[in-house]
Image (cartoon, helix red, strand yellow):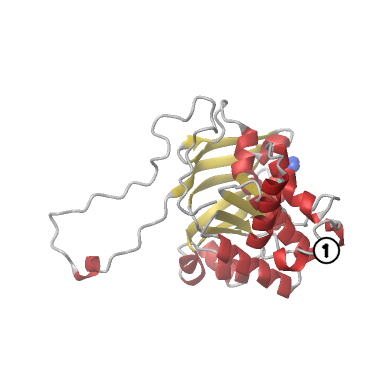
Amino acid sequence: MSTDAVVTPEGLVPTGGLPGAGTVSVAPAPDLHEPLAAASVVAEPEPAPVVFDVSDLSVFYGDYRAVRDVSMRIRRNEITGFIGPSGCGKTTVLRCFNRMNDLIEGARVQGRLDYHGVDLYAPDVNAVEVRRRIGMVFQKPNPFPKSIYDNVAYGPRIAGTKKRSELDDIVERSLQRAALWDEVKDRLKSSALGMSGGQQQRLCIARAIAVDPEVILMDEPCSALDPIATARIEDLMKEIKTDYTIVIVTHNMQQAARVSDATAFFSTEVNPDSDVRTGLLVEFDRTATIFSNPHDQRTENYITGRFG
Ligand SMILES: Nc1ncnc2c1ncn2[C@@H]1O[C@H](COP(=O)(O)OP(=O)(O)OP(=O)(O)O)[C@@H](O)[C@H]1O
Ligand SMILES: [Mg+2]
């Protein structure tokens, strides 16, 4: 869980990685021929290393292409927000990042989705290991009907951790990280179903954290929460991004503007001949650019409330 940990593709594929894997972020060599202009003295911050490199991705449900033209780079220790009107494919694309679409009959991807330089959809990639490294938190808090402790210990137990003291440590650390420990430390044996919605969602985040993932995917994690619980989750996301890479789908544009470093705006297009609606990625950029100076008119219309 350390910030310095470099995640390598080893273990994702049985042969211990693909050639060249893990070398996706290469700083350009400085140009020594140009005189030093004033602007170049003020160094731009280095972009963070790339975790997911998506190029020209489409997702199909059977013959229906639900979303197309998805190209983006998700960077380490950043929060990337997905926004756009209902049905434009945000959830569909999010599920690609940990191969959750594998569990949906008829779903398939076209194009390329690399995780640290490894094609996530290569036949020898272990989807179970993918889902351990890339956790998911859903729209509706979905704790198991078990105790608070057992919810958090669930993943580590499946992964083979049996020693009580080790499990105790993981449970405490994960609940601390999810800003829930102080509220629940005296009732770890109580049912998780007796918690408030906001507490349940933080428990789900603790459960995701407990298996030591690198990435956490969140699909509208605050849509069932009141503004105070929402603010707690937003604070939590900003705090834990030093340890994780986060991708969040949200319908709340203020939330995207508040928490995310990069934003992807998706929309839908209707084919006038067939009347079929397809989602597509319209624009992906730094959040400040998307919200203050978008390049595409469709993005501008959406963020100014003229559409959707
Ligand atoms: N399991 C599925 N089987 C078939 N079609 C699906 C499935 N899931 C989603 N779709 C279709 O794919 C398209 C994109 O859906 P998706 O749920 O990804 O949109 P979304 O942007 O997340 O919408 P919302 O904001 O309402 O959650 C829609 O046309 C939807 O009907
Ligand atoms: Mg959705």
Frontmost residue, 124 versus 169: 169
Residue 275 visible in the snapshot: no
Quarter location, residue 21: top left
- In the rendered structure, the answer to whether residue 102 lies left or right of residue 78 reads right
Frontmost residue, 111 versus 28: 28
Residue at 46 percent of width and 67 percent of height: 289
Frontmost residue, 257 versus 197: 197
Q: Secondary structure at mark 1?
A: loop
How many dots with numbers? 1
Task: Inspect the image, locate mark 1, and give the three-letter code of the amino acid beneath it.
Answer: Met
Task: Characterize the local packing of mark 1: few (<14), some (14-19) or many (20 or more) Cα atoms within 10 angstroms.
Answer: some
Mark 1 Cβ inside 8 Å of ligand 2: no
Q: Position of residue 266 (x, y in %)?
A: 59, 55
Residue at 72 percent of width and 38 percent of height: 158
Residue at 66 percent of width and 72 percent of height: 231
Q: Is residue 154 above or below residue 296?
A: above
Residue at 49 percent of width and 43 percent of height: 7
Q: Quadrant of the C terminus?
A: bottom right
Q: Is residue 133 above or below residue 140?
A: above
Q: Position of residue 157 (x, y in %)?
A: 72, 41
Name the residue that disc number 1 marks: 195
Q: Position of residue 226 (x, y in %)?
A: 76, 72
Residue 78 visible in the snapshot: yes
Q: Position of residue 146 (x, y in %)?
A: 84, 50
- In the rendered structure, the answer to whether residue 109 lies left or right of residue 114 reads right
